[in-house]
Amino acid sequence: MAAARIGFIGLGRMGVPMAGNLLRAGFEVAGYDVNAQTGRELDSRPGYARADSAQACVASADVIVLMLPDSNVVDRLLWETPGLAAAMQSGTLVIDMGSSDPLHSRGNAERLVARGLDFIDAPVSGGVKRALDGTLAIMVGGSKETFKRAGPVLQAMGKTVIHVGAAGAGHAVKALNNYVSAAGLIAVSEALVAAEKFGIDPHLVNQVFNASTGRNNTTERKVEDFMLSKRYDSGFALALMRKDVRTASQFIDGMGTPGRFARECLGVAAAAEEALGAGADHTAVHAYFAALPGN
């Protein structure tokens, strides 16, 4: 696999460092983004070539990495005329690393395998910082054989690579993880606003959270730098958090299991996004609660 040629589609804030780590690991990478100016910092890297189209990006690749916003984009790219699936060589491995819908991913796996292609879903967690240093957590859905084949590619981008089940399982776990993370952020935001209104220094409150059972990713990584500082610029949009919680809520409902709290979190995320406007950072949920009148 060390000599594999990789087509990488989606050179956004996450895609560029991920593709860079593939180059660092010795892979040849052809990159494409619908925005021709995105990812230009890769152009001078040895082993990298910019493709003029998505079709050109996949034409001679052994592995295709898709780092795209959602399943709608992935589905259009794979199947709508002219459709990338028809342009791929037999045996090509497709790795969907964006935040896609689990059921769409399961369907894409079935359709691609029927065409003699391989598929895994391998969404990531860790944000831009861990994309840069190649320490992303990657949760993988697909057959054990395909997971093994993809191993060297995934290990070039992530530190923790876990095979969680059949096709679609990776995207299911990613959606559930992001829901749990969002729920923690919402709870912390509510708690800090209430504590401050009572007259307690919220910095001290967060210190207690981090020394106690309330500790979570938000208390450790977001409260001081982005929320209490009122910077609200962590780099992850509230719109994306809302989208991820919606995907998780729909997945939970589809499983016929209880999903009341997921729906509540989705309602909070949607209300905050409407109040704060387009482009708001997800950590600004804290500002949203601070501005609300009391119950």
Image (cartoon, rainbow, N blue to C red):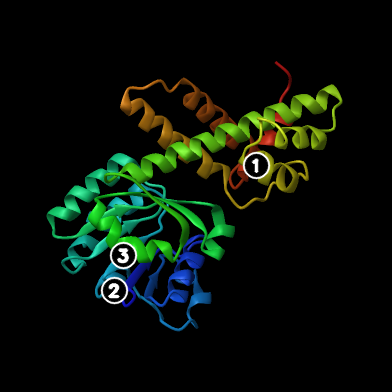
Q: What's the CA distance linking mark 1 and mark 3?
A: 33 Å
> What secondary structure is marked by label 2?
helix
Q: Which residue is mark 2?
A: 56
- Inspect the image, locate mark 2, and give the three-letter code of the amino acid beneath it: Ala
Instruction: Pick the residue in front: 35 or 26.
Output: 26
Q: Is residue 202 above or below residue 158?
A: above
Q: Residue at x 64, y 38 (%)?
A: 276
281 to the left or right of 55: right
What quarter of the picture does the N terminus occupy? Answer: bottom left
Q: Residue at x 37, y 52 (%)?
A: 122
Q: Residue at x 19, y 55 (%)?
A: 112
Q: Is residue 11 above or below residue 194?
A: below
Residue 113: quarter of image = bottom left
Q: Mark 2 or mark 3, which has the lower sequence index? A: 2
Residue 246 visible to the viewer: yes
**Residue 235 at x, y percent in the picture:** 61, 53
Q: Which residue is mark 3?
A: 64
Considering every residue shown, the one lying at the far top of the view is 295
- Inspect the image, locate mark 1, and give the three-letter code of the amino acid beneath it: Thr
> What secondary structure is marked by label 1?
helix
**Residue 127 at x, y percent in the picture:** 55, 54
- Inspect the image, locate mark 3, and give the three-letter code of the amino acid beneath it: Ile
Q: Mark 2 or mark 1, which has the lower sequence index? A: 2
Q: Which residue is mark 1?
A: 283
Residue 164: quarter of image = top left
> What secondary structure is marked by label 3?
strand
**Residue 166 at x, y percent in the picture:** 27, 44
